[in-house]
Amino acid sequence: MDTTPIYELCGRLRAAALAGTGLLSEDFRLRRAYEVFQQLETASPVFAKVGQLTRQLLSKECPNPQGTLLEVMGLTDAVLCTLATVEAEGTVERAETFGVQGSLSVDAPCSKVKGLIKALTTSGSGNYSAGRKCSRSVCAG
């Protein structure tokens, strides 16, 4: 399923919020984004609700355009959060790890973990102090 239309609609809704609801009836870009989005309305009930709210928003008889705009923006933001993907450029390499007494340790130089060790072994603001102490054997050098 191509989700580009929901991203485009969300962008146009944000632009409409910045421009103001008084200009909604003249916003041809939002209408065009909605027309492209209509193909997704049959894909799920949530998309159908976004379409219904957008239609209501674009009609001149919308009783509360500000509230409707906020509602459709909130719904599209929620949909986009569930559609999110994570991408990383380049190749992903596994870190060298080895097991120590059932826990997971990462072979990292002391200079990289010094701040973490300090936070775990001292108390006070910004530090972990639940009665546990970190083993300094990680930073033996």
Image (cartoon, grey):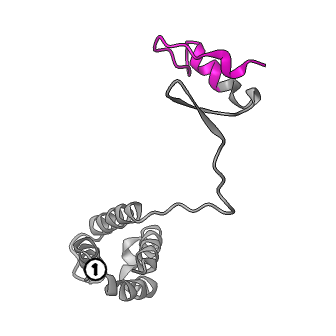
Q: Is residue 48 left or right of residue 131?
A: left
Where disc 1 sits, the SS reads: loop
Please say if 76 is above or below 93: below
Residue occupied by mark 1 = 43
**Which three-letter amino acid code belongs to the residue tagged 1?**
Ala
- The residues colored magenta run 116-141
- Horizontal and vertical percent position of residue 128: 52, 19
- 133 falls in the magenta region: yes
Q: Quadrant of the C terminus?
A: top right
- Horizontal and vertical percent position of residue 122: 59, 13
- Horizontal and vertical percent position of residue 1: 39, 80
Q: Is residue 109 left or right of residue 16?
A: right
Along the line of sight, which residue is nearer the eye, 110 or 11?
110
Please say if 105 is above or below 135: below
Q: Mainly helix, strand or loop, the magenta region?
A: loop
Q: Which residue is at a point 67% across and 61% down the rendered structure image? A: 91
Farthest residue, direction right: 141
- Horizontal and vertical percent position of residue 109: 75, 31
